[in-house]
Amino acid sequence: MQDNSSTDHNISLAYASKIMDDCFECHKCVRNCSYLEKYCDSPKDLAEQFQHPVQDQLDIPYLCNVCGLCKTICPKDLDIGALCMEARQQLVRLGMGPLPQHGSVRTNQKWGTSKHFTLSLPDVATGKCKRVFFPGCCLPGYSPFLTVSTYNYLRKCLPDTGIVLNCCGTPTYLIGDLKGFKTIFNAAVKQIRDMGAEEIIFACPDCFHTFKNFVHDMKLTTVYQIMAEKGIPDPVVKAGNRAFSIHDSCITRHESDLQESVRYLIKSIGYGIEELDCSREKTRCCGAGGMIATVDPEFFMKVVKERGNESPYDYVTYCAGCRLTFAFAEKPVLHVLDLFFRTDLDKWRLKPPPNPFAKWWNRLRLKKTFQRMKA
């Protein structure tokens, strides 16, 4: 990283100019966002600051969760997350980003996309691959059991379903490294195309969103939509009468079909739902969406706890990353797939997240499990 300790480096940000022209400072976004509340009086202030970066303030664009809530509530549809992403990408181009704190993100991406953890496998029963299940990174790290159980369910109701273990590259995208992201993403797409698949089924909302943005010639759906259409796994052991609050991943803000599928699945096995005030199109980020944890762990925990305290009910997520984040903050939480494949929910609702080594070990064990299926 270059040493730019003064304001000598001005950055031309197109979206900053738009915000300075269009924002009439109603402060709706600031009142609804911990990030904006902490770093500016209005988006205009932030836009002006990003155009004149100072070395000891380079972390500020990297502390937005890029969740999209600001755009949803802004009368002018202004997106501060888009501004922050533009600033991150410009800093990378100038050699001022990513930040040193992002070293762990880059290392995780390097190892997670290496031959040690990636795999392509057609349906072992038929040897064919009409579609693939792409579980992403977080679900395998959280639970190899849920990943295998979900894949077996998909093979049963949709024969000729293969499996691809890899990462879509979203973490690299979020730290502003577009070149690195394209390398990772294109490799994952090639891996899928080389199998002859015409459809991709996702467990991770982030992967689903990323592929929707860049792949337009394949059918893309989620396992939750498949389950709502094809029927739930059998049998499901209901763990008593209880209700949950659903945390909608911020990346699903405009994915109403996906949101409805998750709610349908939970209700179909007799559980109640107590909706959060901030849900669906007005959902809030769990705290991990913009890769902020490595830059400011204290602010990250503040955001996570604020979201976790919005309801006294246990949370259900359909993003494994969100599940791990809330568990890290000791919020009772389950992944929606836990409801269908586990019987010990009282244990798992309080299960802490695996440590980094355990997550890598889980992913390695998962690959070995699938390799044994092939054998």
Image: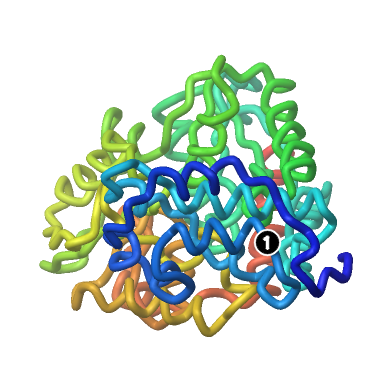
Question: Circle 1 is placed at which residue position?
Answer: 52
Q: Locate residue 238: give its quadrant.
A: bottom left
Residue found at the far right of this picture: 2
In the rendered image of this protein, does residue 117 appear above or below residue 238?
above
The residue depicted at 50 percent of the width and 80 percent of the height is 299
The residue depicted at 19 percent of the width and 43 percent of the height is 264
- Which quarter of the image is occupied by the C terminus? top right
**How far across and down, in percent of the image, does residue 274 sit?**
13, 62
Q: Is residue 362 left or right of residue 161?
A: right
**Residue 235 shows in the view:** no
Residues 134 and 277: in front is 277
Amino acid type indicated by mark 1:
His
**How far across and down, in percent of the image, does residue 47 sit?**
53, 56
**How far across and down, in percent of the image, does residue 207 sit?**
54, 42
Residues 62 and 374: in front is 62
The residue depicted at 52 percent of the width and 47 percent of the height is 82
Q: How busy is the neighbourhood of tag 1: few (under 14 within 10 Å), some, or many (20 plus)?
A: some
- Which quarter of the image is occupied by the N terminus? bottom right
**How far across and down, in percent of the image, does residue 368 sit?**
72, 52
Q: Locate residue 336: give its quadrant.
A: bottom left
Mark 1 element type: loop
In the rendered image of this protein, does residue 211 appear above or below residue 242?
above
Q: Is residue 312 left or right of residue 195?
A: left
**Residue 330 shows in the view:** yes
Q: Locate residue 307: give its quadrant.
A: bottom left
Q: Is residue 66 left or right of residue 225?
A: right
In the rendered image of this protein, does residue 23 appear above or below residue 291?
above
Residues 367 and 314: in front is 314
